[in-house]
Amino acid sequence: MRGIAEELKRALKLLEIEVARLKEEIELWRSRARSALRAGREDLARAALERGRRLEDIASEYEAEIGRLREELRRAVSAPSASAAEARLKIPSAFAEYERLKEEVERIEAEAEELKRAGIEVEFRRLEEEAKVEGELRKLKEKLGL
């Protein structure tokens, strides 16, 4: 039973790390959407929000799987025997689901690479740079009293 619990803990840790990474990326795309709107680029804001939504969907699936694995771990620890715990656990299906979701993330990341090549990433960098320059210009004007 110890091996089963360790496998479940390992699967949980992998999923938790991936959820944290996805949440950081979701926030990045939300920030980019705000920047795009401030710059009057609704098209870029929409693209950023769409990408963020797809990542949110995957994060939600991961979180559901985390909940299921935690329940399986609880059952494994409280099971009267190792064979009973093994019979109730579905570790292979948990790893299969993790792999499926991981492939979905990789597919979305490949699409992001295509977007970079298509210029959206360049547009966001340009917007970020323009915002920095505008901020510096505003500070300079304030300093000069203009």
Image (cartoon, helix red, strand yellow):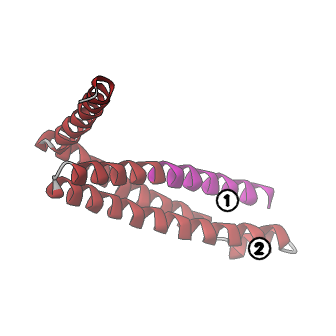
**Residue 46 visible in the snapshot:** yes
Q: Name which residue type carries label 2.
A: Arg
Residue range (magenta): 1-22
Q: Name which residue type carries label 1.
A: Leu
Q: Which mark is residue 75?
A: 2
> Callout 1: 10 Å neighbours few (<14), some, many (20+)?
many
Q: Which residue position holds label 1? A: 8
Q: Quadrant of the N terminus?
A: bottom right
Magenta span includes 4: yes
> Callout 2: 10 Å neighbours few (<14), some, many (20+)?
some
Q: Residue at x 83, y 74 (%)?
A: 79
Magenta span includes 71: no
Q: Secondary structure at mark 2?
A: helix
- Number of numbered labels in the structure image: 2
Q: Residue at x 26, y 28 (%)?
A: 141
Image location of residue 53, percent across then percent down: 34, 64
Q: Magenta-highlighted stretch: main secondary structure?
A: helix
Q: Quadrant of the C terminus?
A: top left
Q: Secondary structure at mark 1?
A: helix
Depth check: give the residue in front, 98 or 139.
139
Depth check: give the residue in front, 104 or 83.
104
Relative vertical location of residue 23 with respect to residue 77 in this rendering, above or below: above
